[in-house]
Amino acid sequence: MNVPPNMTSTATDPATGTTSRLRTDRLSLGYRPDRLVIAELNLDLPTGAVTAIIGANGCGKTTLLRALARLLQPRGGAVLLDGQQLANLPTRQVARQLGLLPQGPVTPDGITVRDLVRRGRMPHTTVLRQWSQADQQAVEDALVVTRMDDLAGQQVDALSGGQRQRAWLALVVAQDTPLLLLDEPTTYLDMAHQLDVLELVRDLHAAGKTVVMVLHDVNQAARYADHLIALRDGSVVAEGRPDEVLTPSLVEEVFAVRCQVLTDPVSDTPLVVPIARL
Amino acid sequence: MSGLPGAELLVSTPSGRLSVLINRRAALVASALLLVVAALAVLSTAFGTRWLPIDQVLSGLLGTADRAVTLTVREFRLPRTVVAVLVGSALGLAGALTQALTRNPLASPDVLGVVSGASAGAVAVLITAGGATVGYGGAAAGLSEVGVPIGALAGALLSAALVLGLASRPAGALPATQRVVLIGIILNAVFLGLVQWALTIGDVDQAAKAAVWLTGSLHGRGWEHVTAVGLALAVLLPLALLLRRPLDAVALGEDIAITLGVRVPRLRLVLFTLAFALAGMAVAAAGAIGFVALLAPPLARRITRSGAPLLTAALMGAALLLTADVLARHLVPGAELPAGAVTALVGAPALLVMLLRSRS
């Protein structure tokens, strides 16, 4: 990994001693001129960790992720990658550092899994050098990691929802970026396929990737994330390790739900059991 | 070169500066289609006011036949065939690019106002300039012979500039690709209205000629019609092929394309301009031939079983237009239909069938 060019602008987390390649600096985001979804947000996304962003519908989680992926221009402040403003970096350079799996991507008609995954190599190719052995290897590796190698020749249209999500994940894996942004990767999947995706996230983490994902399910976030960020109305209510952060009062504040927090007997992580709406 | 899993071949120069991945199936299909186009081209050249045996066509092409046959083949029949190949290819490629960019299988330059813009330009010249015109005008080739293609091209470029210019501005929450489609459809209606208006106020003779031009015909096309569209294709086809990978990324959606490092607005502008220029050149050469740009890409996708085959779509366009032109000359004995009438009469139902079958 490259040494950040500007050490003063990359934050060090005193608790873990890790640096954050990806940060926000007084970031303000919004779609309409009269209303900000997120105002002056300062956030460090720990490198090498799995960070889950949780919050109620409309709290700004997806908006934040879009800004981190440079799909949304800040209205104020900045997203910083290695201390440099994301908005000022060349598109291709960003694409080699940051990969994104958006919510509900739409596959073009009639393409195979391998053809889809191959498109993830876009930032590594040029107009003339359109393909190489390294690209090929990355695609085959991504297919193996996501267990899509047996389905590589199949049409994406013909796959189940869970398989299709894995195919899209394979595209992001083939892009081979140190930072991965996943927007609700488990939504619309059944239990088994949700586990597939989350186990894959764990594998990617083990391989040294930094993962930032928006999750709907608090318990999944607690189980699979090292770092939790709870958002409410565009502000961070709490962040830190799930077992430290996830308390009944936090859930009340963020989701307006009364609950008990138990310990997950399998993973030893917090387990939120909702009682009633406030 | 190396063996890859599946049906791909990695071809590169020794230095590795230039390397491309070739899909064996797509390459095979394209080669087969090229043979079909060549066969259709020979067939198209053999047809005319008088059937010329294939061996005479071939020796005419090679220059080994007697002078009369060589002259007929090379000067009268071959240009028409070549124009059909070039115009068909340009339309097929323009359609493939437009459909991939808009992610909409029903988008093509004839739906998005470019062809009707060209029609308006051509009709304006026909109605105002008077005198002899392309095709059925015959003897008195004059200002309008040159003026009609220029008018068509100007109309196509004006329309393309309007569509892209207006679509570059935000309009509510509409994504850019949908803006292009909606604005294209609206401008299409405006230009068709202008054409109708011009036909109504124009001289009856000129209006009749304009009507033929509007249907699109290859009648009386000579070498002078080949140059412009041929040059356009020679420059723009390789350019489109080089931009194949970013186009593939854009076909996954704007968000993904951006995160894959594509500068989407710029790429979209370049490729739309390319597609619309091809369509404009095609229309300038042969009139408003419909449905080729719409039909060639889905047919190409079907036979290659891949995302957006550009080369195959171009070849498919050539094959479709050659077939239509052969049919146009022989469907009704003793009368020649404009090729555009055939593409519309056959193309529209074919599109309907594809649409209904794709539901399953």
Image: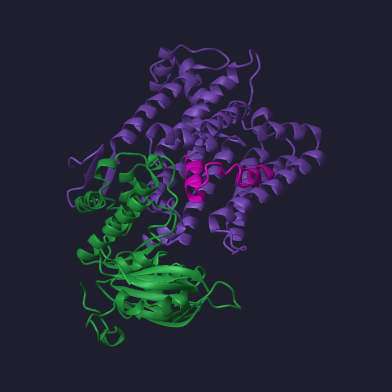
Chain colours: A green, B purple
Q: Quadrant of the N terminus of chain B?
A: top left
Name the residue at 51% across, 19% down: B72
Count of picture labels: 0
Q: Is A148 or B266 nearer to us in this picture? A: A148
Residue A107 image position (x, y, % from top left): 42, 48
In the figure, residue A32 lies in which quadrant? bottom right
Q: Which residues are magenta?
A: B93-120
Q: Main secondary structure of the magenta part?
A: helix
Query: Where residue A168 sits in the image (x, y, percent)?
Result: 35, 52
Place of residue A58 in the rendered image (x, y in percent of width and height, measured from the top left): 52, 69
Image location of residue A94, percent across then percent down: 34, 68
- Which of the pair B22/B256 is nearer the observer? B256
Is A26 in front, or is B193? A26
Q: Which picture quadrant has residue A121?
A: bottom left
Q: Is residue A38 above or below residue A119?
A: below
Q: Is residue B298 left or right of residue A167?
A: right
Left or right, residue A62 beside residue B335: left
Image-based side of A21 in relation to B333, left or right:
left
Residue at left offset 33%, top offset 71%: A262
